[in-house]
Each structure stands twice: as C-alpha cells, then as structure tokens.
Image (spheres, rainbow, N blue to C red):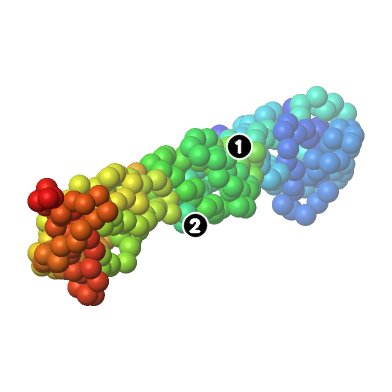
Amino acid sequence: MKRALILFSLLLLQACKHPLAIIGEGDIVDLNGTSFGCMLDDFQADPEICLNNEVVDTDYFVNYAPMPKPGWQFVRWDGICGHLSEGDNCRFEVTQPFVAWFDQEGVDTSSFKITAVFEPIPTVAPTADAGADQSVDEMTNVQLDGSNSSDEDGGIASYQWIQTNGASVTLNNSDTVSPDFQSPELQETELLSFQLQVTDNDGLTATDSVDISVNPVNASPVASAGEDQTVNEMSVVTLAGSGGDSDGTVSIAWSQTDGTPVDLDDATSATTSFAAPQLVAPETLIFQLTVTDNENVSATDRVSITVVPVNIPPWPKQELIRPSLNRVSLFSMAWAVQTPTGRWFPTPGPSWPDPL
C-alpha cells in the first residue's frame, strides 16, 4: 500500500527536476550527498536554483533532511513529502525505468513543490531575581545580588539596576550583576528600594525589586561635670560642665546628689552657679551632670565641691581708758577697742556732764 502511494505521488513529481521551496529560515539537505538539496541563501537569492535539480537515466532516491537556522525549528513538509516523510526526513525512491518514462513523456510537475516549513522557536522571557531584602546599619557598604536571575532558553545578556525609593545613594557598577553602595547617615530608619532589569539574548526583559532597610546607629553623648573644687562657705561657686553628641543634639540637666542642699541658678545650662552654704565644719557637696541626646540616650558625670567654713576671730574686748578734759570743759569718758594685732581704736562710749 505504501509503495503504491509512493508511485502515485511520483506521478505528480517531475523526475528530472526537484522543485524545492523553503518557508521560514532553514536549509533542505540531501543526505545522499547529491546536489539535490536547497540552501536558504540560494533560495533567497534565486528560487529557480532550487527548481533545477536534474536527474536523468538513473535510479531516483532522495532523502531530504530539514536543517533549521539558529532560533528556528522545523514544523512540517508541504507538498509531496507531506505523504512521504519519515520523522522529519522526506524519503522516496524511483528506479531508472520510471525516470526514463517520466522524461520521455515530458511530464511537467514543476508546480508540485516539496516545501520545508520552518518557524521561530518560541522564546521564553528571563526571570529577574534582585535578591533577598536586607536590614543594614547606616554608613555601611551594601551589596546587591542579582546572580539568581536566569533564562531557561538562553542566557542573561545584561543587567541594569536603578533606585526607586528612599534617600538617594550612588550605585557603583549599576550595570553588573552585583552593584554596591554606601548606606546613608540617617536620624531614623528608612527604606531604600532598588529595581533590577535583566535582558536575555533574545532581547526579552524581566524586572524584580529589593528593599534595603537602613537603621541609624546612635553615638552616645558625652558628659563632663568639670573639675572638683574646694571653696569657702558663703562664696559663689561656678560649675563648669560640658556635653555633646557627634550625631545629634543634647539637653543638659544638673542635680545635687549629696550634701547640704543649695539652689542652682540654672540647672539646664552646662555652666551654672550656687552660693556655698554657711557651715561649722567642712562638707562635700556632690553634683551630677546628665547629658541626653535626641535619641534619649544619656551620659552622666559627677563633680565634688568641698566647702570649708571661714574662721572669724571673736569680738575683741572693750576696755575703759583714762578720762580727759576736752576743750569745751566737758568731763567725758572715752572707750576704745583693741584688735588682735594690739592696735587700739576709739569707739563711742558713755559721757557725763562736767561737774563744775
């Protein structure tokens, strides 16, 4: 039955010429090594070349194989080979007597072409993978990673990263699989977003995004309550403190933690003062300076103020000195005081009328 079908089909095929045609991009190759095939470049230059494969006075056996160009695939045979294909190949055989008979009869079947049909291989878009989300500290180097991007029917031809959200940073090597950047200095946590676009060897693209959470790292404030002091009672004492924070602002607060309570002029100023209390014995007053930054982190320092009492000599005794007669003939008594150095100073004293 199959032989009968082959013979019937060959009645439609000119024995001396093999009209071949190509749809799409591919070659028709005769696996017998003859010149009966048809190359795509020749067919595109002059289709008549593929219509003039001469066969005269010989056995007729052809084994055509489709050879798709890169990116293309063989679909089917149209025409006579549509009935005579084995797998992807088109195979048929006619002996020399039949070839001679077709030639003698002058059968013209050039319009019955053997056509190989090719079509582009369907392409699959790549898969972009921008890596896992990250949580990092401020002022650190951050690496992005797109190495898990893939393309199942080819390869990734290019990478392109852009920033889509958050405080602006400079992406180093943004056209590579793994760029990096320096996280910004921040006062509060901020989310940075980046998009990766990959392009495969077929020109198809895909995108993916990654989020980087940047956390501020607070530097602790510094507090200095100044040098310890020794002062006299009832004197004005100055507390010369200082405080600061390398990455923010600070507030100041003085407090007394030990000793006779005193009143500070301004407990919220780094430099403040107070009046030393009156004492009967030396005493140490302790003050604490607290420095708090804008992130509510505090530092403290203490200073000791030793207050000593001042020794005041007792009031000198008063003695009565000899009376004298003044020029107004008044008899009076004069009083004087003697200092610890032995000097005498007159003081007002009682007086009496002149007895005369």
Task: Tell me what residue is drawn at x 23 percent, y 68 percent.
Answer: 344
Horizontal and vertical percent position of residue 95: 75, 44
Comparing labels 2 and 1, the label whose residue is closer to the camera: 2
Residue type for callout 2: Asn
Q: Do labels 2 and 1 touch, CB within 8 Å? A: no
* Whether residue 102 is situated above or below residue 308 in the rendered picture: above
Task: Tell me what residue is drawn at x 47 percent, y 45 percent.
Answer: 130
Instruction: Please give left or right for residue 215 compared with residue 344 in the image.
Output: right
Q: Earlier in the sequence, mark 2 or mark 1?
A: 2
Check residue 204 in the rendering and tell me which mark sits there, or answer none: 1
Nearest the camera: 99 or 334? 334
In terms of secondary structure, where does tag 1 sit?
loop
Instruction: Please give left or right for residue 351 compared with residue 180 in the image.
Output: left
Horizontal and vertical percent position of residue 112: 76, 26
Nearest the camera: 242 or 349? 349
Check residue 141 in the rendering and tell me which mark sits there, or answer none: 2
Is any atom of residue 198 visible in this view? Answer: no
Check residue 29 in the rendering and tell me which mark sits there, or answer none: none
Task: Tell me what residue is drawn at x 77 percent, y 47 percent.
Answer: 59
